[in-house]
Structure formats: structure tokens, C-alpha cells
Amino acid sequence: MRKYLLLAWLLIPVIIIAVHYGPGRKYRSMEAATHQIKHAEELEIIAETSNDPDDWLHVVEAYRQALVLTPPENKLAASRIKLAAARAQMYEGELVEAITELESLLQDARMEDFPTGHQNDIRDTLARSQFGAAWVMRLEGAGTDLWTKQAENARQNFRLLAENAMKTDNAAAPDHQKNLEATIRMTQMDASIIKGLPLPREAENGQGKGVGDKMGEAGEQEGQEGIGPTQEGDARGKGAGQGERPEGVGS
């Protein structure tokens, strides 16, 4: 009996070490990640109020730190953190980078068959980023092919969200429909009207970031054709806009 008691006593440190480096390590990692997420959310409240790009950058960095602390096997949690970081990046004004991240994130979410609600959140943020990029590029006088591509991408995403929400009687359907209509109206507005309107929230910090130049470079890298120096004055729907910002996205 003494031998078994002695053996059990000697095994206690081994068990403690196993828990420490096994399940215990995973638990501590998730606890640290959760704490970091709460910190990022607190910073996000500050950024929402100030809408200062530097404040949004702090939010992006905080979420990325939370991602580092998240166990790699928890793919859904990691995807949600990446979405939060990309959304903050959009509001920071880094629209092209946010679009690239969100497109990749949506593809991964579909491959992993993540919950539909999460996929919709990614698609909605992606559409908002595309809408904001199109708006900023119109202000920059970017080639028509550049901004209309992003506007069309936003339109397709908002349309899909609206149709799916109506099929499932989702309460978000009216918002998606408004965003769809706002995107269509934006493409029909003359450049002179766009320049006289207040910026949607998704575009406020995007000015001066060379969104059109970045989009053009990305298109060249992908081997796309038809991206030329078309002037904003040649935009389709010239004169069809009205002197108020489309209700929906960013309002």
C-alpha cells in the first residue's frame, strides 16, 4: 500500500505538468485572448466616437494581438477576430487592404462551412468596404473601370444579402435592401454631386490613401485588362443623381 501511495505522490508533479502544458495551456491561451478582445472592444468604443484613423489603427493592432493569442485549432474564433480587425481597418481608411482581407476571409469561411450568420457578417463588411472604396475613387477622379468594378461588387453582395434575408424572413432584410439601393444610386450620380455630399462613414478616412492607385496596381498584378485613364466625367449615369447622399450605407 505504501508503495502505491508513494507512486501516486510521485505522479502528482507529472500530472500537474501535463495539465499545465496540455489543456491548461489551451485554457490560459483562450483566457488571454478573451482579455485582449475585451481590450480591443474598449478601444473600438473610443474609435467609434472620435473616428480618428490613429484610434482605429490601435483597434486593428489590438485585435491582431488577440488573434496571436487564439489557439490555431479554434478556427471560427480566429475568423471572427479577423473580421473585427478588417472592419476596423475599413474605418481606418485602409480600404484596399480591408477588401483583400475580407475576400480571403469570406472564401475561407465558405470552405470551412462556418455559420451562415458569420458569413453574412463578412459579406456585409466586404460590401461596405467596396462601397466606400468606390466612393473615394470617384472623389479621386479614378478611372471609371476601377470604381465601377468595386461598386458592382458591392451591389452584388448587398443584393445577395437582401435576397437571402428575405427568404429567411431575417430582420436585416430592409437594411440590406437600403444599402443595395444606395449603391445603385451612387453609381448614377454625377461626379459634381458626389463631391458636394458628405462622405459615408466607410469612406471618411479613405481620402488621401491613393485608393485608385492601389486598385490599379492590384488589377495589373492580377493581369486584368481595361483599366485605363478614363476620366470621372465619362461615368455612366451622368446627371442622373440627386443632390443628397443615398440613404443606406454609412448613414
Image (cartoon, rainbow, N blue to C red):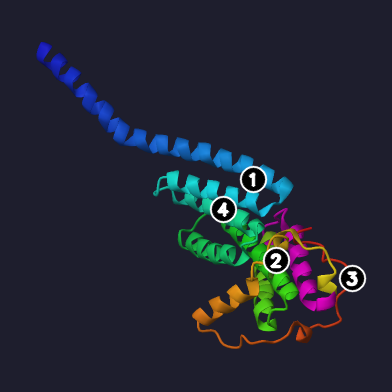
Left or right of 42: which side holds 30?
left
What is the crowding at mark 3: few (fewer than 14 residues within 10 Å), some, or many (at least 20)? few
Q: Secondary structure at mark 1?
A: helix
Q: Nearer the viewer, mark 2 or mark 4?
A: 2
The mark that comes first in sequence, 1 or 4, is: 1
Please name the residue that numbered disc 2 is placed on. Answer: 207
Q: Residue at x 68, y 60 (%)?
A: 165
Residue type (three-letter) at the residue carrying disc 4: Ala
| Residue 171 among those drawn in magenta | yes
In the rendered image, residue 99, in percent from the top left (x then y), is placed at 58, 66
Q: Nearer the viewer, mark 2 or mark 3?
A: 2
Q: Quadrant of the N terminus?
A: top left
Q: Secondary structure at mark 2?
A: loop
Give how far apart the Cα atoms at labels 1 and 2 are: 21 Å
Q: Which residues are magenta?
A: 166-192
Residue type (three-letter) at the residue carrying disc 1: Glu
Question: What label sits on residue 85 in the rendered view?
Answer: 4
Residue type (three-letter) at the residue carrying disc 3: Gly
Q: Residue furthest right?
A: 243
Q: Is residue 211 above or below residue 143?
A: above
What is the crowding at mark 1: few (fewer than 14 residues within 10 Å), some, or many (at least 20)? many
Give how far apart the Cα atoms at labels 4 and 3 are: 34 Å
Q: Residue at x 52, y 61 (%)?
A: 105
